Amino acid sequence: MSRRIIATDPTDDGKPPLVPKLRFPEFREAEGWSEKPLKAVAQINPPNKGLPESFIYIDLESVDSGELKAKKQISRVGAPSRAQRLVERGDIVYQVVRPYQRNNLLCEFDDNDDYVASTGYAQLRAKGSNRFLYQSIHSDSFVGKVMAKCTGSNYPAINSSDLAEIQLPFPPSLAEQKKIAECLGTVDEVIAAQARKVDALKTHKKGMMHQLFPREGETQPCLRFPEFRDAGEWEEKRVDEMGEVLAGKALAVTAPGPMRPYLRTKNVLDGAIVLSDVLSMPMTDAEFSRFEVLDGDILLNEGQSLELVGRASIYRGEFVGRCAMQNQLLRFRAFPSTCREFAAQTFQKCQKDGTFAGVATKTTSVAHLGSSRFCALLLPWPSSLPEQQRIADCLTSLDALITAETHKVEVLKLHKRGLMQQLFPSPEEVEA
């Protein structure tokens, strides 16, 4: 591959030619790229001839690293009303809501099943290399143009007619399209392989948790560390017998007191605290002390979707300075007789196995765990602190490995984005 940029004559409209910073040797003497609207290089929402009796319904929420994780046959009669886009091999299912997530799918399945996507997505059928088009729509330049045409704040979305007009740069030859797609596809394969490794570790941890915690109706786990095999049965105890539970402060923008930083649902992920968007609200000194989050506290999502309600993580002083919590969160502060790491693993298990969802109240879009229901929940606990710590050490070591391998996925994705910036010319840079 060459970094040499060939100067060519200006295009018909007087603009400098589009040339990528990085070009394969066999194309370095080729003409510059040209900008084309998406509708010129792909059919958008092509007409269907009808749906089969049964099919696999494509939900982009189950797409990870370009792969569809869940495949389940459903009947046409029982399918959602929006299941109308019959997908052909090579089609691209494009996420028109929150397109910045780049959660799109290239439909190259290795089976003979029929696939149908929702009308809530756009269906793209490339006129040239479908793999090149798939890579193109993930470039920073294209995503930026799409976001500029989106409407809505919480759920920015673009309609198909506006999407059709979005310009993207295209090489002059199909051969160059395929070469670039092949290069980036190789990186995608490495990313997907690393993602599968992460999934395998998560599956392994889930299996370990099933072995290290008693099953429903039992008082001892199937797998117990040798030094605790004669330690007796686990005890069922209320959550509030193991630690202090408190709901956060309700948001009140006109309340008295200086502005104080606080954490909310968006900041508490599964086993991680993120500080990319910390907000502030007024609190008195007494309120700030009451709702303050301390190192070692466990924070849980009080209100979330049904499958994520109770999502938990230990706070380890990630925020520089003092911070509090909003009432979207519950705080569990372990008593001295309770291992906080074990409690965190217990709560993560409860979120994943549906225990929290089973006691939560449900509305149309949000489930609420509630401090009183959380406090009263009966859960099995080892009688000794050393056994709690031993189990926690085992599971947290797996968490550390999962985190490290997940970081590798993110590094690979960053590498790919940097490579794309070199392989795709930027019209914005040329105009500047």
Image (cartoon, grey):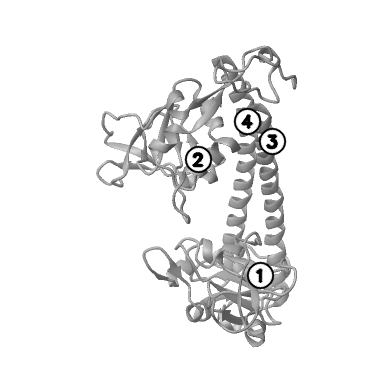
Task: Specify the amino acid type for callout 2.
Answer: Val
Task: Specify the amino acid type for callout 1.
Answer: Phe
* Local SS, label 4: helix
Distance (Cα) linking label 4 and label 1: 57 Å
- The answer to which image quadrant residue 299 occupies is bottom right
- The answer to which image quadrant residue 422 occupies is top right
Task: Specify the amino acid type for callout 3.
Answer: Gly
Name the front one of labels 2 and 1. 2
Quarter of the picture holding the C terminus:
top right
Name the front one of labels 4 and 3. 4
Distance (Cα) linking label 2 and label 1: 45 Å
Q: Earlier in the sequence, mark 4 or mark 3?
A: 3
375 vs 65: above or below: below
19 vs 232: above or below: above
* Local SS, label 3: helix
Instruction: From the image, tell me which residue sits under label 4.
Output: 431
Instruction: From the image, tell me which residue sits under label 1.
Output: 342
